[in-house]
Amino acid sequence: MVHFLRLHGQMKTSKYKKIWAVLLTLFLLLIPQGAWAASGTSYQAETETLHRLGLFLGTERGFELHRLASRAESAVMLTRLLGKENLAKELNANHPFKDSYAWADPYLGYLYQERLTNGVGPDLFGFGESITPNQFVTFLLRSLGYQEGEDKDFAFEDALEKGLEVGLYSQVQYDSLQSMAWLTRGHCALLSYQTLFVSLKDSDIFLLEKLYLNDGAVTGEAILAAGENDKRLSAFAAKELGLTEGSLQLSAGEIYEKASSAVFLIEVFDRKDVLLGTGSGFFIGDDGRFVTNYHVIKNAYRAKVHLTDGKTYPVDVVLGIDENNDLAILQIKTDKKTPYLTIGNAELMENGDKIYALGSPEGHMNTLTEGIITNKHQSVNGKVLIQMTAPIAAGSSGGALLNEWGQVIGVTSSGLKDEKNVGFAVSANHIADVPLTEEKSLAFLFNEHHLDVMPSDEEGNYYEQEPNDTRGNANVYPADEMMIGAIDKPNDVDMFRISVQNTTHIAVGLTCGSDWFTENLVLMLIDEEENIIALSDVETINNTRMQTLYGTMEKGDYYLALMQNGPKEKDSLWYDVPYYMIYYYE
């Protein structure tokens, strides 16, 4: 056997590799391999269960359980066990592998983007190469949240031992795996099936439970259907998932218990920290990503969310907006994972179906109302919305519209003023279409869309606007443009806000045209907590005295603060002395 494998490893051309792969398959099938080679065993029953769950689809020639599994097929299985097949297809992310085929590109792209798989070389995945036990068990461990590598959960060479430790297989199966060079598709199906009933890392949630309740990758209907011919699955579904025939639809109380912790109140503020209004939002990922209506955060300078556990978080970044469909995806940063809702398919709903609206109308957090869909394709001001009877009000915008399984099928957005039982929601199917862009703060996004708050003349110069003596009313103006202003009263302070999206070096120059006045000003760069990042100094440049400032900023909002720093006996003269300031990024 060792000699045979050595010969196989020496084959250089794809032609010979294919020939040897076929011969090796036949050879492996003739060799007893402990618990893996029981007479007639092909793991057909386990594979049928995976197939009914949508986790194993087969080929045009059927399941082909005796054929060696390839690395590419294993990558597809990992993506499905992660519950990310639909996301992978939607993203269709790029990858560097030149030996891939179109059908596998979305899966390899997703796994590569998430750093869940590597190739056999810089631009080769080893697409058609057979999968080894260590490689496939590593994939299974990743689906449970374990990481391999230095100072991680396990080393790659110890993957089989880790799999035994967490309960992926029995000791007898482990002993057999150690003696195997490659796995067949049947082996992969059996291991994948067994992994469904194993808990995630540091959790009491089973993988199948996650795929069903959290990811929506496996439906309750599919679990019940597969359980008709699988006693283990049927018993597990009843005990751990509460799934029995007729139990799929949730009561209003169960809907609230399942969804309420993922829905929250949003408050939005302007540049002067005045409350603009309230809305609702809901998490769509355990990393703090959430969805709301675009109109909830439009024109906001900052926002914060109030969660059901009593904690409040600032909204850190805007990930994407879709003004046409009135949707926005944002994110808060927390030290722990956030509860989140599963996105359903609004097109599967029918007029007359029961729905639930969960949001914060008039600021009343997490109010649940119920109703039915009266028109799932209602035309409103040129847009197609879901019309429903569940009562909503101001503040409900951005809330979750849920079906009877607790899945989001819409984002509540508006209603009729005099008709409390006529409301509208944006289809949740549009969430996947929100274009994701470079992360931006609300303040930066507001600046981008509203630079006209700082008027400029025909030459493009910007003029200071009073009052601007605090961070809340600081003026905004872009880099590389001239700012003209004046310290027009004793103890006057002029504040200017700038936002950066990554580590940035800034250089600022300012002059008054008069050496004395220039020398008696001071310019500071401060952060949101009013910590001083940099102070200006006086330099002579081209025979002109200038205040110059150089500093380094991390991602965030910052302020340039200008004020007097000299004798007061000439206070009355400051009224007529303009300053000219410009900054640029290095």
Image (cartoon, helix red, strand yellow):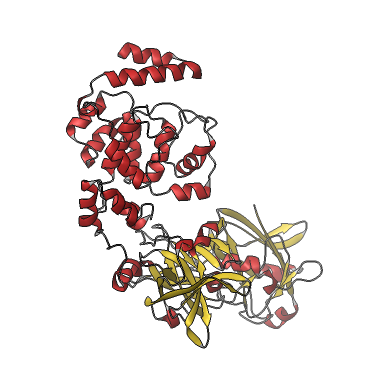
Taking the spot 31% from the left edge, 45% from the top edge, the residue there is 144
Q: Is residue 201 left or right of residue 303?
A: left
Taking the spot 34% from the left edge, 25% from the top edge, the residue there is 182
Given residues 542 and 292, the one toward you in this image is 292
Given residues 318 and 509, the one toward you in this image is 318
Taking the spot 44% from the left edge, 17% from the top edge, the residue there is 19
Q: Quadrant of residue 286?
A: bottom left
Given residues 404 and 195, the one toward you in this image is 404
Q: Quadrant of residue 433?
A: bottom right
Quarter of the figure that contains the N terminus: top left
Residue 311, position as x, y percentages in the image: 35, 70
Given residues 563 and 291, the one toward you in this image is 291
Q: Is residue 36 above or below residue 299?
A: above
In the image as oriented, which residue stretches furthest toward the bottom? Answer: 418
Residue 191, position as x, y percentages in the image: 28, 37
What count of labels does the image hold?
Answer: 0
Q: Is residue 269 above or below residue 542?
A: below
Residue 234, position as x, y percentages in the image: 23, 51
Q: Is residue 146 visible?
A: no
Residue 24, position as x, y percentages in the image: 36, 18
Q: Is residue 100 visible?
A: yes
Q: Is residue 124 left or right of residue 495?
A: left
Q: Is residue 171 above or below residue 215?
A: above
In the image as oriented, which residue stretches furthest toward the right? Answer: 458
